[in-house]
Amino acid sequence: MSAIPTTPETSQSRLWREIAVALALKTVALALLYFLCFDASKRPQISPAAVAEKLFARDRG
């Protein structure tokens, strides 16, 4: 059995392929977590006026 010689070009292209696959898998994992945990259906319904009142209200304590 003859081994395939490793040239710098093949090892570099293999490295780029591994990096691309890792980034793609991480992107898919992050998207899955977002849709499972932070989807719009899980957010409470708050009106913009209520948010503005909380943000811009002075301390009444």
Image: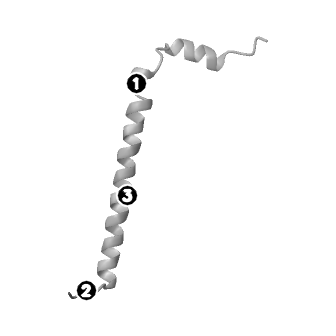
Nearer to us of marks 3 and 1 is: 3
Residue 26, x across and y down, in percent: 40, 50
Residue 27, x across and y down, in percent: 38, 48
Kind of residue at disc 2: Ala
Nearer to us of marks 2 and 3 is: 2
- Name the mark on residue 40: 1
Outermost residue toward the front in this view = 1
Q: Nearer the viewer, residue 1 or 8?
A: 1
Instruction: Report the Cα–Cα distance between label 2 and label 1.
Output: 53 Å
Q: Secondary structure at mark 3?
A: helix
Q: Is residue 2 above or below residue 49?
A: below
| Display coloring | one colour
Outermost residue toward the left in this view = 1
Quarter of the picture holding the C terminus: top right
Kind of residue at disc 3: Ala
Instruction: Report the Cα–Cα distance between label 2 and label 3.
Output: 27 Å
Few, some or many C-alpha atoms within 10 Å of disc 1 (few <14, some 14-19, many ≥20)?
A: few
Q: Nearer the viewer, residue 61 or 19?
A: 19
In the image, what residue occupies the spot 65% across and 18% down? Answer: 56
Q: Report whether 40 appears left or right of 59.
A: left
Q: Secondary structure at mark 1?
A: helix
Tag 3 residue: 22
Kind of residue at disc 1: Ala
Residue 42, x across and y down, in percent: 43, 22
Report which quarter residue 35 is drawn in.
top left
